[in-house]
Amino acid sequence: EVGQPALAERYARFAVDMVPNSFAARILTATALRQQGKNFESEIQFRRALDVADTDAERQMARQSMRIVENTKKWSGNLTLGIAPTTNVGKVSSAQRLGTVFDDFLQNFSREEKPETATGVLYGATITRHFRGPANANLNFSLGQVRREYKATENNSTTTTFRFSSQTPATASGQSYLSYERILTDFANSPYSQRTSVTFGHVFRSFGDRRANGSIGIDQTKYVRTGTEAQKYRASLSHDLYASRLFSVSMSVSGSTSKSDAIDYTSDRVEVGARVSLSPPSTGWRFDLSVERGWEEWREKKDAFLERRKDLDLTTTLSVQNQNISFLGLTPALSITQQTRDSTVNLYDLESQDFFIGVSNAF
C-alpha cells in the first residue's frame, strides 16, 4: 500500500505465512519494514529473500536491496568463521642448512625445528559505527578481533584492531580517504607487537570505468618482548587494466622503507602485483586470483650470517565462492594461499600453503 507501510507489512507477512519460500513476499515484507525504519528486521527479510531466490534477476534484486540497507545502517557487524589448515604452522624455514658463520659447528647437529602441518580454527568479529554524509562521504569507527587457534598453543595468534576511516564527498575528480589503525598482535597467548598506521589516499577514474588508487602511509611498530621500535614509510598505486561486471584485471606497485635501531627492521622493499576477478554469467560463481612478487633488501649484515639478507618472495592467493548458495546472506568460501621466499640467508627460506574454508557475506 503506497504511503501505508505498516498495512503493507501486515499483508506481506500474511503472504509469507502462506508461502514461506515466496521471493516476492519476502521482498515486499523487507521493503515495508525498511520504509518504517525497521532496518534490522528488514535486513533479515532481505537475507531470506536471497535464500529463496530462483533466478539471477531475483538474486541481483535481493543483493542490490541489501546494499541499500548496508549503506544506510548506523551500525554494522561482520563475522568470520572457518577452519584454517596449513602446511607450515609456525612459518619456520624450509632450509636444510642454516648458512651462518658457525656452519662447521652446526652441521654436526640436525635441525629440530621443521615445517609442520596443522589444522586450526579461525574466527572473529568486527563492529562498525557509521556516520554518513552527502555524496558518499562518511566517517567510520570499528573495533574487531580475529583469532587463529591450533592444538599447539604456541602457534595461536590474536589480532585486535581499532580503525577510524573517513572519505570526502565524491566528485568528478574522485574521492579522497584517510585511515588510522591501532593493531595489537598476540602470539602464543602473550603480547607480540603494537602497531599504529596512518594512510592517506585518493581514488579516481582514469579511462571509462577503470579506476586508479594512490596512497601513502606510515607505520610505527613496537615489539613488546624486546622493546624494539621500527618505522615504515610506504606508497602504493593500483590501476584497473580492464573492468566489467563479469571480468576485471588490475595491476599494483608499492614500495616501502623501514628504519630502526635494530638491524632486523631496517630494509627497503618493492612489490608488484596483479589481480584477476571472474564471475561467469548465470552461475553464481566468483573467482579471485592475486599474485604478488616482492623484493626486499636489508641495509646491514648481521654478524652471525655470511651475507647481507636479500629476499625474493612470491605470494599467490585463489578465492572461490558461489553466491547462489547462501543462508541468511552468508555463503561458503574457500581460499588457498601459496607463499614462497628465497633468501640469501637461507634461515629465512620459506614454503607454505594456507587454506581457509568457512563462510562470508554474499553481497
Image (tube, rainbow, N blue to C red):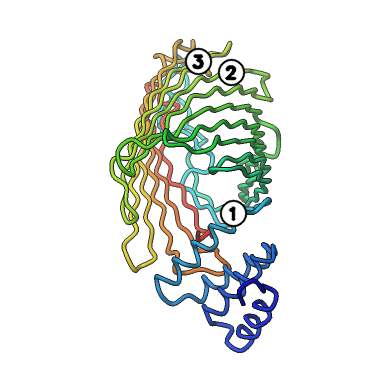
For mark 1, give the secondary structure: strand
- Circle 2 crowding by C-alpha within 10 Å: few under 14, some 14–19, many from 20: some
Instruction: Look at label 2 and name its amino acid.
Output: Ala
- In this view, 88 is above or below 168: below
Q: Is residue 232 left or right of residue 343?
A: right
| Closer to the camera in the image, 272 or 351 | 272
- Picture quarter containing residue 341? top left
- Give the x, y percent position of residue 309: 42, 18
**How many angstroms separate mark 3 from mark 2 (CA)?**
8 Å
Relative to 180, say whether 317 is above or below.
below
Q: Position of residue 254 (x, y in %)?
A: 40, 27
Q: Dots 3 and 2: beta carbons under 8 Å? A: yes
**In the rendered structure, which amino acid carries the disc numbered 1?**
Thr
Q: CA distance from mark 3 to mark 1?
A: 34 Å
Label 3 residue SS = loop
Q: In the rendered view, tell whether residue 303 sits above or below residue 87.
A: above
- Residue sticking out furthest to the front: 3
Residue matched to label 3: 266
Image point (68%, 51%), residue name: 75
Quadrant in which the N terminus is drawn: bottom right
Query: Mark 2 falls on what kind of element?
Result: strand
Left or right: 154, with 264 as reference point: right
Q: Which residue is mark 1?
A: 80
Q: Is 208 located above or below residue 295 in the figure? A: below
